[in-house]
Amino acid sequence: MSSKSPAGTDQNAVPEAPAPAQEEPRSLRIEDWLTVIVMAALALITFANVLVRYFTNSSFAWTEEISVFLMIVLALVAGSAAVGRDRHIRIEFFCEAGSAARRRRLAQLGALMVALLFALIAVLSIRTLYDDFRFEETSPGIGVPQWWYTMWLPILSVAISMRAIGLFIRRTRQPDAEYLKDGTAEGPANARDKQP
């Protein structure tokens, strides 16, 4: 006769151990700190603009332009961190089904496709950067050279592409048996759900 708790669960059952954390590059601290800095800058700029608008009935002309630029940088930096941590969007029905070898191959394919996409974005945005520089385009809000903003798209796209290549290399070196043990074996979402 097993002892049951009032809720009807077995008290002698051993809780499942949480899935080990995925291997994560230490250099992701760069993206983490850039995210903090950009978010702080956005908050300060917006707060300063609200104060000026409240007390003077006018606003800083440059805040919207800088805020839009910082939000784009924030999205790309966060995208780089997501790729480095293997947290990019995927369809779990396909990626979490099948053998460990199949899962690993799909993870490798996903990493390669992300690397290819952002390498292509980097190449195409270099052309835009060159055009902005060559034609001396200026920003609409404050009139600074447009290439000051445009140059960050190829830089951050290359960073995301490099993170994806790093993820591909980590997945290639990881044996199938280890792939079953890490958080991706049952899917990050499922592994988190099973933790007490």
Image: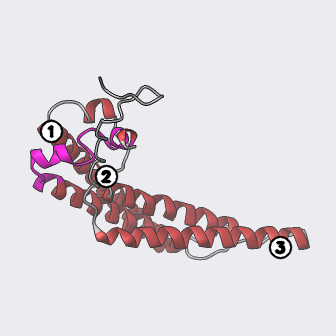
Label located before the other in sequence (1 or 3): 3
- Between 59 and 181, the residue placed more toward the observer is 181
The numbered dot on residue 6 is none
Instruction: Give how far across and how far down residue 82 sits, in percent.
Output: 38, 55
| Front in this rendered view, residue 53 or 108 | 108
In space, the residues marked 1 and 3 are separated at their CA atoms by 57 Å
Which residue does the image show at 35% across and 29% down from the upper left?
Answer: 3
**Quadrant location of the C terminus?**
top left
**In the image, is 94 to the left or to the right of 80?**
left
The residues colored magenta run 171-192
Predominant secondary structure in magenta?
helix
Q: Left or right: where does residue 99 sit relative to residue 118?
A: left
Q: Quadrant of residue 22?
A: bottom left
The kind of residue tagged 2 is Asp
Tell me if residue 172 is in the magenta stretch. yes
Q: Is residue 25 left or right of residue 48?
A: left
The amino acid at mark 1 is Ala
Disc 1, SS: helix
- According to the picture, the residue beneath numbered tag 2 turns out to be 86
Q: Identify whether 159 is placed above or below 121.
A: below
- Label 3 crowding class (10 Å Cα cut-off): few <14, some 14-19, many 20+? some
Q: Which residue is mark 1?
A: 100
Can you tell which of label 1 and label 3 is closer to the viewer?
1
Question: Residue reaching furthest top?
Answer: 1
| Residue at image mark 3 | 52
Q: Quadrant of residue 13?
A: top left
CA gap, disc 1 and disc 2: 16 Å
Rendered location of residue 62, percent (x, y)? 70, 72
Q: Earlier in the sequence, mark 3 or mark 2?
A: 3
